[in-house]
Amino acid sequence: MAKIQYIAPSPKAGQIEHVRPDTARTLVAAGFAIDIPYKDFRARLADAGAANDPHNVNPCVEGVQWGVKDANESGFGVVAVVKRFGSETTWYSTPPEDAPESIKRRYRDLTNTVSGPSAAAQLDAAKRKQLEYDHSIKDVRRY
């Protein structure tokens, strides 16, 4: 990163900014800014570590973050629950005991699985409904 100060022709006159070196060279060459050299490498590193760089982020999250990924998004082909704590990310195939109720509800909504005899009855009803619909549109004129 380079440190520059904008001068009079610029709308940002008087402001000091940290920009990429190529941007700094362009602004200085165009007469919109002056280059402010660092005293030594320690000063440059202190500025870089002072959150002036947008890529300089803390990978740790505050508290616990929960999420549910759909089967298409999870990368595993199944609905997955994601828990982030600190810098750790844990994936679960089912919601753990400590998951909030909203996460458990979202997981149930995404899985939406029905098993047992009612599942077969629901499947038969859906097939029957589809056959009835297909029969009802059989004679519809198509262009």
Image (cartoon, helix red, strand yellow):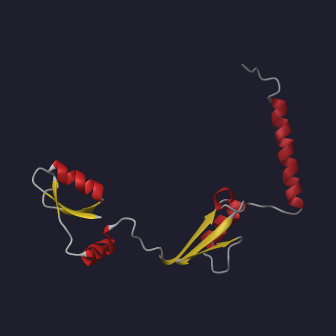
In the image, residue 138 sits, relative to residue 95, either above or below, namely: above
| Residue 14: quarter of image | bottom left
The quarter of the rendered structure image containing the C terminus is top right
Q: Residue at x 66, y 59 (%)?
A: 70
Q: Residue at x 65, y 62 (%)?
A: 74
Residue 102 is situated, as x and y percent measured from the top left of the image, at: 60, 70
- 40 or 120: nearer the eye? 40
- 98 or 23: nearer the eye? 23
Q: Residue at x 82, y 40 (%)?
A: 130
Would you say 6 lies left or right of 143 here? left
Q: Residue at x 84, y 63 (%)?
A: 115
- 132 or 71: nearer the eye? 71
In the image, residue 138 sits, relative to residue 11, either above or below, namely: above
Q: How many marks?
A: 0
Would you say 88 lies left or right of 59 here? right
| Residue 40: quarter of image | bottom left
| Residue 83: quarter of image | bottom right
The quarter of the rendered structure image containing the N terminus is bottom left
Residue 106 is situated, as x and y percent measured from the top left of the image, at: 64, 65
State the residue lying farthest toward the front: 40
Residue 139 is situated, as x and y percent measured from the top left of the image, at: 82, 23
State the residue lying farthest toward the left: 8
- 60 or 129: nearer the eye? 60
Would you say 90 lies left or right of 13 here? right
